[in-house]
Image (cartoon, rainbow, N blue to C red):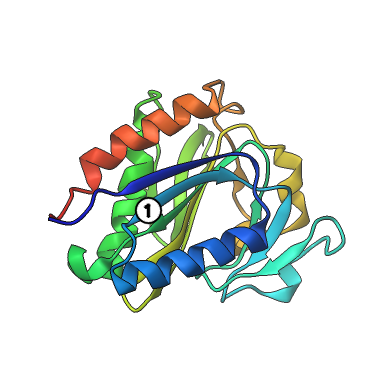
Amino acid sequence: MSPPIEWRISDGLVDYAEAVAVMEARVAAIRAGTAPECVWLLEHPPLYTAGTSARPEDLLDPGRFPVFQSGRGGQYTYHGPGQRVAYVMLDLKRRGADVRAYVHALEEWLIRTLAGFCLSAGRRDGRVGIWVERGGGREDKVAAIGVRVRHWVTFHGIALNVEPDLSHFQGIVPCGISQHGITSLWDLGLTPTMAEVDSALMAAWQEVFADPG
């Protein structure tokens, strides 16, 4: 029987480079069998990350916040206070060794989490992340997904906009998509605390990611 997943919640703002170093070490330990899988919930100070597909022209305001090169897939993403980041470190060899199915499960995790707040959100063909309809044909992104897999162990993960400063997204073209907007739970009129969001994430996780044993 494999050990249960460790849930780690960090108070305060976690430095991005420090978080990457912690993830790197944990991924190596999971692969070596010396540490359990982990989901790490945290917030970062304001910053932009560039994924492996990031285009220089999508960084609209290079001097606004620190910019970090990230090994995750995707393009430019913003992280900052009021956004719940979940770094997910799983051994996919124990979970079917299917990266596409893993990303689909992350999407489902977010969709069910948001449903817990009576918010209907979903996938969109050709667009990464989780989206909500705003009326009049407008759709806004409420959560981003960016993953990396090394030796079948995952890291990076998801970012759910709870109550970030949405103006901070204006320094980039988020995920390379300029024709749609960015929203948050608070922008949509929902005002959960971060602790309530964490509880919803944990509850939805049990529905989506069954322990493979």
Most foreground residue, 58 or 17: 17
Residue ID at (59%, 26%): 186
Most foreground residue, 189 or 94: 94
Whether residue 115 sits left or right of residue 189 in the image: it is left
* Residue 187 appears in the picture as rendered: yes
Most foreground residue, 13 or 208: 13
Most foreground residue, 84 or 41: 41
Residue position for label 1: 38
Q: Secondary structure at mark 1?
A: strand
The C terminus sits in image quarter: bottom left
Residue 176 spot, x, y in % from top left? 61, 64
Check disc 1: other Cα within 10 Å, few if <14, some if 14-19, many if 20+: many
Residue 10 spot, x, y in % from top left? 55, 41
Question: Residue lying furthest front in this view?
Answer: 34
Residue ID at (24%, 48%): 4
Q: Amino acid at mark 1?
A: Cys
Q: Is residue 141 above or below residue 77?
A: above
Q: Is residue 49 above or below residue 12?
A: below
Residue ID at (29%, 41%): 205
Q: Quadrant of residue 109?
A: top left
Whether residue 100 sits left or right of residue 178 in the image: it is left
Residue ID at (73%, 75%): 56
Question: Residue lying furthest bottom in this view?
Answer: 151
Q: Quadrant of residue 34?
A: bottom left
Whether residue 151 sits left or right of residue 66 in the image: it is left
